[in-house]
Amino acid sequence: MKNEELIKQRFKQVMPQLDFCSLRYIEARSEALQVRQNIAQPPTSKHDMGLMITVIERGGGLGYAATSDFSVEGLRNAISRAKRWAESSRDKMITDFSKIKMPHAQGEYASVVEKSWDSLSLADKLDLLHRESAQCKINDKIVDWQASLESVQTEQLYLTNQGGEIRQSHDYLIPNVGVTANQGIETQYRSFGGLDYGWQGGLEILEQTDFVGKGHKVAEEALQLLAAPDCPVQKMDLMLAPNQMILQIHESIGHPIELDRILGDERNYAGTSFVTLDMFGHYQYGSPLLNVTFDPTISTELASYGFDDEGLPAEKTYLIRHGILKRPLGGIVSQARAGLAGVANARASSWNRPPIDRIANLNVEPGESRFEEMIRSIERGILMKTNLSWSIDDSRNKFQFGCEWGQLIENGELTQVVKNPNYRGISATFWRNLKQVGNADTLEVFGLLTCGKGEPNQAIRVGHASPTCVFSNVDVFGGV
Protein backbone atom coordinates (compact mmCIF):
# COMPACT_ATOMS: atom_id res chain seq x y z
CA MET A 1 0.00 0.00 0.00
CA LYS A 2 1.32 3.43 -0.92
CA ASN A 3 2.44 5.80 1.83
CA GLU A 4 -0.46 8.14 1.03
CA GLU A 5 -3.09 5.50 1.85
CA LEU A 6 -1.40 4.48 5.08
CA ILE A 7 -1.08 8.10 6.17
CA LYS A 8 -4.73 8.78 5.31
CA GLN A 9 -5.90 5.84 7.44
CA ARG A 10 -3.68 6.80 10.37
CA PHE A 11 -4.67 10.48 10.24
CA LYS A 12 -8.34 9.45 10.56
CA GLN A 13 -7.37 7.27 13.50
CA VAL A 14 -5.63 10.04 15.46
CA MET A 15 -7.53 13.10 14.19
CA PRO A 16 -8.01 15.53 17.10
CA GLN A 17 -11.18 17.42 18.04
CA LEU A 18 -10.06 20.89 16.99
CA ASP A 19 -11.37 23.84 15.01
CA PHE A 20 -8.91 22.97 12.26
CA CYS A 21 -6.24 20.37 11.68
CA SER A 22 -4.50 19.54 8.40
CA LEU A 23 -1.85 17.11 7.24
CA ARG A 24 0.37 17.88 4.25
CA TYR A 25 2.53 14.98 3.05
CA ILE A 26 5.22 15.39 0.37
CA GLU A 27 7.49 12.83 -1.25
CA ALA A 28 10.14 14.07 -3.69
CA ARG A 29 12.63 12.22 -5.90
CA SER A 30 15.26 13.78 -8.12
CA GLU A 31 18.12 12.74 -10.38
CA ALA A 32 20.74 15.07 -11.86
CA LEU A 33 23.20 14.30 -14.68
CA GLN A 34 26.02 16.47 -15.99
CA VAL A 35 28.76 16.21 -18.59
CA ARG A 36 31.45 18.85 -18.11
CA GLN A 37 34.26 19.32 -20.62
CA ASN A 38 33.19 16.01 -22.21
CA ILE A 39 33.57 14.11 -18.93
CA ALA A 40 30.53 12.66 -17.20
CA GLN A 41 30.24 13.87 -13.62
CA PRO A 42 28.96 11.59 -10.84
CA PRO A 43 25.15 11.39 -11.05
CA THR A 44 23.27 12.55 -7.99
CA SER A 45 19.89 11.38 -6.73
CA LYS A 46 17.73 12.36 -3.77
CA HIS A 47 14.68 10.88 -2.10
CA ASP A 48 12.92 12.89 0.59
CA MET A 49 9.56 12.49 2.34
CA GLY A 50 7.77 13.78 5.38
CA LEU A 51 4.65 15.58 6.55
CA MET A 52 3.52 18.75 8.27
CA ILE A 53 0.67 19.00 10.77
CA THR A 54 -1.10 22.38 11.11
CA VAL A 55 -3.42 23.08 14.04
CA ILE A 56 -5.74 26.02 14.74
CA GLU A 57 -7.20 26.11 18.25
CA ARG A 58 -10.29 27.86 19.57
CA GLY A 59 -9.12 31.31 20.57
CA GLY A 60 -6.98 31.78 17.49
CA GLY A 61 -3.69 29.99 18.17
CA LEU A 62 -1.78 28.45 15.29
CA GLY A 63 0.82 25.68 15.52
CA TYR A 64 2.93 23.54 13.17
CA ALA A 65 4.90 20.34 13.61
CA ALA A 66 6.78 18.35 10.97
CA THR A 67 7.80 14.70 11.11
CA SER A 68 9.14 11.89 8.95
CA ASP A 69 7.68 9.30 11.37
CA PHE A 70 4.50 8.08 9.66
CA SER A 71 3.49 5.65 12.40
CA VAL A 72 0.33 6.21 14.46
CA GLU A 73 2.50 7.27 17.37
CA GLY A 74 4.52 9.57 15.10
CA LEU A 75 1.36 11.36 13.94
CA ARG A 76 0.07 11.62 17.51
CA ASN A 77 3.35 13.19 18.62
CA ALA A 78 3.30 15.70 15.76
CA ILE A 79 -0.30 16.69 16.52
CA SER A 80 0.57 17.07 20.19
CA ARG A 81 3.52 19.34 19.41
CA ALA A 82 1.44 21.43 17.00
CA LYS A 83 -1.26 21.82 19.65
CA ARG A 84 1.29 23.00 22.22
CA TRP A 85 2.56 25.62 19.80
CA ALA A 86 -1.02 26.73 19.08
CA GLU A 87 -1.72 27.04 22.81
CA SER A 88 1.50 28.97 23.40
CA SER A 89 0.83 31.36 20.51
CA ARG A 90 -2.84 32.01 21.31
CA ASP A 91 -2.31 35.28 23.16
CA LYS A 92 0.62 36.46 21.05
CA MET A 93 -0.83 36.40 17.54
CA ILE A 94 -1.76 39.55 15.62
CA THR A 95 -4.42 37.46 13.86
CA ASP A 96 -7.19 35.33 15.34
CA PHE A 97 -6.76 32.29 13.12
CA SER A 98 -9.95 30.67 14.43
CA LYS A 99 -11.95 33.35 12.58
CA ILE A 100 -10.43 32.38 9.21
CA LYS A 101 -12.54 29.91 7.27
CA MET A 102 -9.93 27.43 6.06
CA PRO A 103 -10.73 25.39 2.92
CA HIS A 104 -11.65 21.70 3.04
CA ALA A 105 -11.46 21.08 -0.70
CA GLN A 106 -11.26 17.80 -2.56
CA GLY A 107 -9.52 17.36 -5.87
CA GLU A 108 -6.52 16.19 -7.88
CA TYR A 109 -3.82 17.61 -10.12
CA ALA A 110 -1.09 15.90 -12.17
CA SER A 111 1.57 17.24 -14.51
CA VAL A 112 1.09 16.48 -18.19
CA VAL A 113 3.90 14.07 -19.10
CA GLU A 114 4.22 12.74 -22.63
CA LYS A 115 7.60 11.06 -22.22
CA SER A 116 8.64 10.03 -18.73
CA TRP A 117 12.16 10.46 -17.36
CA ASP A 118 12.54 6.68 -17.06
CA SER A 119 11.53 6.07 -20.67
CA LEU A 120 15.14 6.84 -21.66
CA SER A 121 17.96 4.82 -20.13
CA LEU A 122 20.72 6.42 -18.07
CA ALA A 123 23.20 5.57 -20.85
CA ASP A 124 21.04 7.26 -23.49
CA LYS A 125 20.60 10.39 -21.39
CA LEU A 126 24.35 10.62 -20.80
CA ASP A 127 24.96 10.07 -24.53
CA LEU A 128 22.70 13.03 -25.25
CA LEU A 129 24.66 15.21 -22.83
CA HIS A 130 27.99 13.99 -24.26
CA ARG A 131 26.86 15.04 -27.74
CA GLU A 132 25.85 18.51 -26.56
CA SER A 133 29.08 18.89 -24.60
CA ALA A 134 31.19 17.86 -27.59
CA GLN A 135 29.49 20.53 -29.74
CA CYS A 136 30.56 23.27 -27.32
CA LYS A 137 34.31 23.03 -27.91
CA ILE A 138 34.41 24.74 -31.30
CA ASN A 139 37.42 26.95 -30.57
CA ASP A 140 40.41 27.04 -28.22
CA LYS A 141 38.91 30.19 -26.70
CA ILE A 142 36.17 28.01 -25.19
CA VAL A 143 37.67 27.29 -21.77
CA ASP A 144 34.78 25.68 -19.91
CA TRP A 145 31.50 24.08 -20.96
CA GLN A 146 28.86 21.76 -19.61
CA ALA A 147 25.50 20.18 -20.41
CA SER A 148 23.12 18.88 -17.76
CA LEU A 149 19.67 17.43 -17.12
CA GLU A 150 17.74 17.13 -13.90
CA SER A 151 14.40 15.49 -13.20
CA VAL A 152 12.30 16.16 -10.09
CA GLN A 153 9.12 14.23 -9.25
CA THR A 154 6.85 15.02 -6.32
CA GLU A 155 3.73 13.45 -4.81
CA GLN A 156 1.62 15.44 -2.37
CA LEU A 157 -1.37 14.58 -0.17
CA TYR A 158 -3.33 17.22 1.76
CA LEU A 159 -5.96 16.18 4.34
CA THR A 160 -8.11 18.16 6.77
CA ASN A 161 -10.20 17.21 9.77
CA GLN A 162 -13.40 18.11 7.90
CA GLY A 163 -12.99 15.87 4.88
CA GLY A 164 -10.56 17.84 2.74
CA GLU A 165 -8.50 15.59 0.48
CA ILE A 166 -6.23 16.83 -2.31
CA ARG A 167 -3.73 14.73 -4.26
CA GLN A 168 -1.21 16.41 -6.54
CA SER A 169 1.75 15.04 -8.49
CA HIS A 170 4.36 17.09 -10.34
CA ASP A 171 7.10 16.24 -12.82
CA TYR A 172 9.78 18.82 -13.60
CA LEU A 173 12.59 18.84 -16.14
CA ILE A 174 15.60 21.15 -15.88
CA PRO A 175 17.93 21.19 -18.93
CA ASN A 176 21.02 23.41 -19.09
CA VAL A 177 23.98 24.17 -21.35
CA GLY A 178 26.63 26.71 -20.40
CA VAL A 179 29.81 27.88 -22.20
CA THR A 180 32.62 30.16 -21.02
CA ALA A 181 34.93 31.83 -23.55
CA ASN A 182 38.14 33.63 -22.65
CA GLN A 183 40.81 35.68 -24.40
CA GLY A 184 43.40 37.50 -22.29
CA ILE A 185 41.62 39.41 -19.55
CA GLU A 186 38.21 39.14 -21.25
CA THR A 187 35.73 36.40 -20.29
CA GLN A 188 32.20 35.92 -21.59
CA TYR A 189 29.50 33.42 -20.61
CA ARG A 190 26.56 32.25 -22.71
CA SER A 191 23.97 29.71 -21.75
CA PHE A 192 20.72 27.96 -22.40
CA GLY A 193 19.24 27.73 -18.96
CA GLY A 194 20.38 31.06 -17.58
CA LEU A 195 19.32 31.12 -13.94
CA ASP A 196 18.43 27.42 -14.14
CA TYR A 197 15.31 27.44 -16.28
CA GLY A 198 12.84 24.65 -15.68
CA TRP A 199 9.54 23.37 -17.03
CA GLN A 200 6.80 21.06 -15.87
CA GLY A 201 6.60 17.85 -17.87
CA GLY A 202 8.79 15.01 -19.09
CA LEU A 203 11.51 14.51 -21.66
CA GLU A 204 9.25 15.98 -24.36
CA ILE A 205 10.42 19.35 -22.99
CA LEU A 206 13.74 18.74 -24.77
CA GLU A 207 11.97 18.82 -28.13
CA GLN A 208 9.74 21.73 -27.17
CA THR A 209 12.76 23.86 -26.21
CA ASP A 210 14.99 22.68 -29.11
CA PHE A 211 17.58 21.44 -26.61
CA VAL A 212 19.47 19.34 -29.16
CA GLY A 213 22.02 21.61 -30.85
CA LYS A 214 22.08 24.19 -28.07
CA GLY A 215 25.74 23.36 -27.31
CA HIS A 216 26.98 24.60 -30.68
CA LYS A 217 24.65 27.60 -30.67
CA VAL A 218 25.67 28.94 -27.24
CA ALA A 219 29.36 28.34 -28.03
CA GLU A 220 29.08 30.43 -31.21
CA GLU A 221 27.33 33.20 -29.29
CA ALA A 222 29.95 33.15 -26.51
CA LEU A 223 32.64 33.73 -29.14
CA GLN A 224 30.60 36.53 -30.72
CA LEU A 225 30.37 38.23 -27.32
CA LEU A 226 34.10 37.81 -26.76
CA ALA A 227 34.80 39.77 -29.96
CA ALA A 228 32.04 42.35 -29.43
CA PRO A 229 32.45 45.95 -28.22
CA ASP A 230 31.03 47.01 -24.87
CA CYS A 231 27.42 48.03 -24.60
CA PRO A 232 27.11 51.81 -25.04
CA VAL A 233 26.08 54.16 -22.23
CA GLN A 234 22.92 55.95 -23.26
CA LYS A 235 19.20 56.35 -22.62
CA MET A 236 17.42 54.40 -25.33
CA ASP A 237 14.59 52.03 -26.13
CA LEU A 238 15.06 48.64 -24.48
CA MET A 239 13.66 45.46 -26.00
CA LEU A 240 13.64 42.55 -23.55
CA ALA A 241 13.39 38.97 -24.76
CA PRO A 242 11.12 36.65 -22.73
CA ASN A 243 14.11 34.99 -21.04
CA GLN A 244 15.01 38.36 -19.49
CA MET A 245 11.43 39.52 -18.98
CA ILE A 246 10.97 36.63 -16.55
CA LEU A 247 13.39 38.17 -14.05
CA GLN A 248 12.01 41.67 -14.60
CA ILE A 249 8.52 40.36 -13.81
CA HIS A 250 9.80 38.34 -10.87
CA GLU A 251 11.74 41.07 -9.09
CA SER A 252 9.81 44.25 -9.89
CA ILE A 253 6.23 42.91 -9.96
CA GLY A 254 6.18 39.53 -8.21
CA HIS A 255 7.97 40.33 -4.98
CA PRO A 256 6.51 43.84 -4.52
CA ILE A 257 2.92 42.56 -4.64
CA GLU A 258 3.40 39.59 -2.26
CA LEU A 259 0.85 40.38 0.43
CA ASP A 260 2.80 39.12 3.43
CA ARG A 261 5.72 41.31 2.37
CA ILE A 262 3.38 44.33 2.12
CA LEU A 263 2.08 43.46 5.62
CA GLY A 264 5.66 43.55 6.91
CA ASP A 265 6.34 39.85 7.48
CA GLU A 266 9.56 39.79 5.45
CA ARG A 267 11.11 43.11 6.44
CA ASN A 268 13.88 41.56 8.55
CA TYR A 269 15.02 39.12 5.88
CA ALA A 270 13.83 39.59 2.29
CA GLY A 271 12.74 43.21 2.64
CA THR A 272 9.54 45.19 2.30
CA SER A 273 7.69 46.67 -0.70
CA PHE A 274 7.04 50.08 -2.18
CA VAL A 275 3.46 48.85 -2.67
CA THR A 276 0.97 49.67 0.11
CA LEU A 277 -2.48 48.23 0.83
CA ASP A 278 -4.30 51.38 -0.29
CA MET A 279 -2.87 51.14 -3.83
CA PHE A 280 -4.99 48.16 -4.89
CA GLY A 281 -7.81 49.04 -7.21
CA HIS A 282 -6.47 52.30 -8.60
CA TYR A 283 -2.62 52.52 -8.63
CA GLN A 284 -1.10 52.97 -12.10
CA TYR A 285 1.59 50.28 -11.90
CA GLY A 286 2.40 50.33 -15.61
CA SER A 287 1.25 51.60 -18.97
CA PRO A 288 -2.23 50.59 -20.21
CA LEU A 289 -0.49 47.84 -22.23
CA LEU A 290 0.51 45.99 -19.05
CA ASN A 291 -1.68 43.00 -18.15
CA VAL A 292 -0.34 40.58 -15.54
CA THR A 293 -2.00 37.35 -14.43
CA PHE A 294 -1.60 34.72 -11.79
CA ASP A 295 -2.16 31.63 -13.94
CA PRO A 296 -1.66 28.12 -12.53
CA THR A 297 -3.30 26.50 -15.57
CA ILE A 298 -0.48 26.44 -18.17
CA SER A 299 0.61 22.81 -18.31
CA THR A 300 4.34 23.27 -18.91
CA GLU A 301 4.83 26.22 -16.56
CA LEU A 302 6.84 25.42 -13.45
CA ALA A 303 4.33 26.50 -10.79
CA SER A 304 1.12 25.08 -12.27
CA TYR A 305 -1.07 23.31 -9.73
CA GLY A 306 -4.69 22.70 -8.81
CA PHE A 307 -4.62 23.86 -5.19
CA ASP A 308 -2.17 25.76 -3.01
CA ASP A 309 -0.70 24.28 0.17
CA GLU A 310 -3.58 25.54 2.30
CA GLY A 311 -6.11 23.78 0.08
CA LEU A 312 -7.37 26.84 -1.81
CA PRO A 313 -8.41 26.07 -5.43
CA ALA A 314 -6.21 27.88 -7.96
CA GLU A 315 -7.54 29.72 -11.00
CA LYS A 316 -6.34 32.33 -13.45
CA THR A 317 -6.72 35.85 -12.01
CA TYR A 318 -5.71 39.31 -13.26
CA LEU A 319 -3.40 41.09 -10.81
CA ILE A 320 -2.69 44.10 -13.05
CA ARG A 321 -5.15 45.03 -15.78
CA HIS A 322 -4.50 47.78 -18.32
CA GLY A 323 -1.74 48.98 -16.02
CA ILE A 324 -3.91 49.25 -12.87
CA LEU A 325 -2.94 47.21 -9.79
CA LYS A 326 -5.92 44.99 -8.95
CA ARG A 327 -4.92 42.17 -6.58
CA PRO A 328 -1.97 41.08 -4.46
CA LEU A 329 -0.25 37.71 -4.37
CA GLY A 330 -1.77 36.67 -1.06
CA GLY A 331 -3.16 33.37 0.23
CA ILE A 332 -6.17 32.89 2.46
CA VAL A 333 -4.50 33.92 5.74
CA SER A 334 -2.99 37.11 4.33
CA GLN A 335 -6.29 37.93 2.63
CA ALA A 336 -8.06 37.75 5.99
CA ARG A 337 -5.42 39.92 7.64
CA ALA A 338 -5.47 42.58 4.93
CA GLY A 339 -9.14 42.52 4.01
CA LEU A 340 -8.23 42.11 0.34
CA ALA A 341 -9.03 39.43 -2.21
CA GLY A 342 -5.94 37.53 -3.31
CA VAL A 343 -5.10 34.24 -5.01
CA ALA A 344 -4.23 30.64 -4.16
CA ASN A 345 -0.49 31.11 -3.70
CA ALA A 346 0.29 29.99 -0.12
CA ARG A 347 3.07 27.49 -0.81
CA ALA A 348 5.81 25.67 1.06
CA SER A 349 9.13 24.53 -0.33
CA SER A 350 8.97 21.15 1.40
CA TRP A 351 7.19 19.10 4.06
CA ASN A 352 9.18 20.73 6.88
CA ARG A 353 8.23 24.32 6.02
CA PRO A 354 4.87 26.10 6.50
CA PRO A 355 3.10 27.72 3.53
CA ILE A 356 3.70 31.44 2.97
CA ASP A 357 2.71 33.85 0.20
CA ARG A 358 4.84 33.04 -2.85
CA ILE A 359 5.15 34.03 -6.46
CA ALA A 360 3.70 31.15 -8.50
CA ASN A 361 2.96 31.42 -12.25
CA LEU A 362 3.12 35.17 -12.79
CA ASN A 363 2.75 36.11 -16.44
CA VAL A 364 2.58 39.14 -18.70
CA GLU A 365 -0.26 38.58 -21.14
CA PRO A 366 0.60 38.96 -24.84
CA GLY A 367 -0.32 42.10 -26.77
CA GLU A 368 -0.72 42.72 -30.48
CA SER A 369 2.73 43.77 -31.76
CA ARG A 370 4.65 41.54 -34.15
CA PHE A 371 8.37 41.11 -33.48
CA GLU A 372 9.42 42.53 -36.84
CA GLU A 373 7.15 45.54 -36.36
CA MET A 374 8.66 46.25 -32.95
CA ILE A 375 12.17 46.18 -34.40
CA ARG A 376 11.20 48.46 -37.29
CA SER A 377 9.66 51.00 -34.92
CA ILE A 378 12.90 51.52 -32.94
CA GLU A 379 15.27 54.22 -34.16
CA ARG A 380 17.89 53.70 -31.44
CA GLY A 381 17.66 50.84 -28.98
CA ILE A 382 19.01 47.53 -27.76
CA LEU A 383 17.74 43.94 -27.50
CA MET A 384 18.82 42.09 -24.34
CA LYS A 385 18.53 38.37 -23.59
CA THR A 386 19.15 36.02 -20.64
CA ASN A 387 19.79 37.41 -17.19
CA LEU A 388 23.35 37.35 -15.87
CA SER A 389 23.19 39.58 -12.79
CA TRP A 390 20.63 41.44 -10.75
CA SER A 391 20.32 43.86 -7.88
CA ILE A 392 17.21 45.47 -6.40
CA ASP A 393 16.65 47.43 -3.20
CA ASP A 394 14.80 46.17 -0.11
CA SER A 395 11.52 47.78 -1.17
CA ARG A 396 11.75 46.25 -4.67
CA ASN A 397 11.85 49.66 -6.26
CA LYS A 398 15.25 50.68 -7.65
CA PHE A 399 16.92 47.94 -9.70
CA GLN A 400 19.89 47.16 -11.92
CA PHE A 401 20.06 44.08 -14.18
CA GLY A 402 22.75 42.69 -16.45
CA CYS A 403 22.27 40.29 -19.36
CA GLU A 404 24.38 37.76 -21.23
CA TRP A 405 23.48 39.04 -24.70
CA GLY A 406 22.97 42.48 -26.21
CA GLN A 407 22.33 43.57 -29.79
CA LEU A 408 21.86 47.14 -30.97
CA ILE A 409 18.78 48.23 -32.91
CA GLU A 410 19.51 51.10 -35.30
CA ASN A 411 17.05 52.69 -37.69
CA GLY A 412 14.68 49.76 -37.43
CA GLU A 413 17.25 46.97 -37.85
CA LEU A 414 19.14 44.61 -35.54
CA THR A 415 22.83 45.42 -35.98
CA GLN A 416 25.94 45.14 -33.77
CA VAL A 417 26.23 42.51 -31.01
CA VAL A 418 27.50 44.12 -27.77
CA LYS A 419 28.85 42.56 -24.59
CA ASN A 420 28.18 43.30 -20.91
CA PRO A 421 24.76 44.91 -21.48
CA ASN A 422 23.11 46.37 -18.36
CA TYR A 423 20.12 48.54 -17.59
CA ARG A 424 18.62 50.18 -14.52
CA GLY A 425 15.44 51.89 -13.45
CA ILE A 426 12.69 52.34 -10.88
CA SER A 427 9.95 49.73 -10.95
CA ALA A 428 6.84 51.85 -11.46
CA THR A 429 8.52 54.31 -13.84
CA PHE A 430 9.95 51.44 -15.84
CA TRP A 431 6.60 49.66 -16.28
CA ARG A 432 4.84 52.92 -17.14
CA ASN A 433 7.35 53.27 -19.99
CA LEU A 434 6.19 49.97 -21.49
CA LYS A 435 5.35 51.01 -25.05
CA GLN A 436 5.01 47.74 -26.98
CA VAL A 437 3.96 44.22 -25.97
CA GLY A 438 4.63 41.36 -28.36
CA ASN A 439 1.86 39.13 -29.66
CA ALA A 440 1.37 35.45 -28.81
CA ASP A 441 4.02 34.43 -31.37
CA THR A 442 6.67 36.08 -29.17
CA LEU A 443 5.40 34.51 -25.91
CA GLU A 444 7.64 32.00 -24.15
CA VAL A 445 7.16 30.01 -20.94
CA PHE A 446 9.96 29.69 -18.41
CA GLY A 447 10.49 28.92 -14.73
CA LEU A 448 12.99 29.81 -12.03
CA LEU A 449 14.01 27.15 -9.56
CA THR A 450 15.25 28.83 -6.41
CA CYS A 451 13.25 31.89 -5.39
CA GLY A 452 14.28 32.48 -1.78
CA LYS A 453 12.12 33.86 1.01
CA GLY A 454 11.01 33.15 4.58
CA GLU A 455 12.70 32.33 7.87
CA PRO A 456 13.87 29.60 7.90
CA ASN A 457 14.62 30.03 4.21
CA GLN A 458 12.40 28.45 1.58
CA ALA A 459 13.74 28.14 -1.98
CA ILE A 460 10.80 27.43 -4.25
CA ARG A 461 9.99 26.95 -7.94
CA VAL A 462 8.17 29.76 -9.74
CA GLY A 463 6.91 30.12 -13.29
CA HIS A 464 6.86 33.09 -15.65
CA ALA A 465 5.59 33.51 -19.19
CA SER A 466 6.04 36.64 -21.24
CA PRO A 467 6.10 38.03 -24.74
CA THR A 468 8.90 40.25 -25.99
CA CYS A 469 8.41 43.80 -24.67
CA VAL A 470 9.78 47.27 -25.48
CA PHE A 471 10.38 50.02 -22.91
CA SER A 472 11.22 53.63 -23.73
CA ASN A 473 13.84 55.97 -22.27
CA VAL A 474 15.79 53.35 -20.29
CA ASP A 475 19.22 53.97 -18.78
CA VAL A 476 21.46 51.45 -20.57
CA PHE A 477 25.16 51.00 -19.86
CA GLY A 478 28.11 48.66 -20.41
CA GLY A 479 30.78 47.20 -18.14
CA VAL A 480 31.06 43.97 -16.19
Image (cartoon, rainbow, N blue to C red):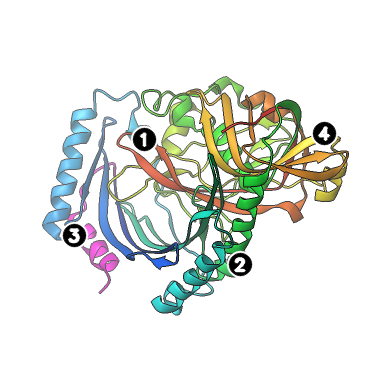
Mark 1 and mark 4 lie on one chain; the one further toward the N terminus is 4
Q: Which residue is mark 1?
A: 454
Measure the C-alpha gap from mark 2 to mark 4: 32 Å
Mark 2 and mark 3 lie on one chain; the one further toward the N terminus is 3
Q: Which residues are magenta?
A: 1-20
- Mark in front: 1 vs 2: 2
Q: Are marks 4 and 3 in contact (CB under 8 Å)?
A: no
User: At which x and y percent is residue 207?
Assistant: 60, 69
User: At which x and y percent is residue 479?
Assistant: 60, 31
Q: Main secondary structure of the magenta part?
A: helix
Q: Is 231 placed above or below 309 here?
A: above
Q: Which residue is mark 4?
A: 380
The tag on residue 420 is none
Considering the numbered disc 1 on the image, is that residue within a helix, a strand or a loop? loop
Q: Which residue is mark 3?
A: 70
Q: Is 95 placed above or below 113 here?
A: above
Measure the C-alpha gap from mark 1 to mark 3: 26 Å
Q: Are marks 2 and 3 in contact (CB under 8 Å)?
A: no
At label 1, the amino acid type is: Gly
- Mark in front: 1 vs 4: 4
Determine which quarter of the picture holds residue 14. Answer: bottom left
User: At which x and y percent is residue 402?
Assistant: 59, 36
The tag on residue 213 is 2
- The residue closer to the viewer here, 125 or 172, is 125
